Structures are given as C-alpha cells and as structure tokens.
Amino acid sequence: MKKKCDVCHGKFKKSKMLKLESVEMISPGCLFTRRVKETWRCNTCKSIYKMAKK
C-alpha cells in the first residue's frame, strides 16, 4: 500500500518504532496493540504521518 505525503506528495517510507514492536511481541492481539499506530516518514520532506493499524 503506497501512501502519499499531504505536504509535498512524496512517497512515504514505513518505519515502526522498536518500542511498539516489543509491546506487540509481549502481548500479541491485545486491545492496546490493536490501537498502536504505525509511523510513516516521508522520504522527501521528512514529515511524519501516523496511521491506525487494522
């Protein structure tokens, strides 16, 4: 799935935070981790876009 930046319409690169990954490993499928957001960083202007995981 490709995301476009709202600021410069560049392409986003997906970057997960290590803290969130470790939470998912400790308790997979719990309510907290379902609400964890994935972080996308724009390659062009470096703005950050957060998207709720499904």
Image (tube, helix red, strand yellow):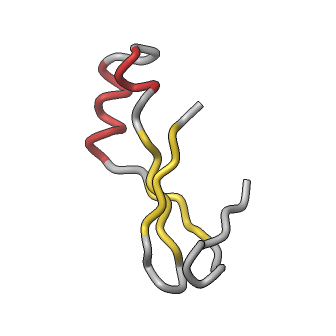
Q: Residue at x 64, y 74 (%)?
A: 11
Q: How many marks?
A: 0
Position of residue 21 relative to residue 51, above or below, is above
Please tell me which residue is depicted at 67% across the width and 63% down the height of the picture.
3
Seen at 53% across and 79% down, the residue is 43
Q: Position of residue 33 (x, y in %)?
A: 39, 26
What residue sits 46% from the left and 15% below the top?
A: 29
Instruction: Pick out the residue farthest to the right.
Output: 1
Position above or below: 6 against 28 = below
The extreme left residue here reads 19
Outermost residue on the front side: it is 6
Q: Quadrant of residue 19?
A: top left
Q: Give above or below for 49 relative to 16.
A: below
Does 5 sit above or below residue 28? below
Residue 42: x %, y % from top left: 52, 74
Image side of residue 46 versus residue 23, left or right:
right
Q: Position of residue 18 (x, y in %)?
A: 30, 47
Residue 54: % across, % down: 59, 30
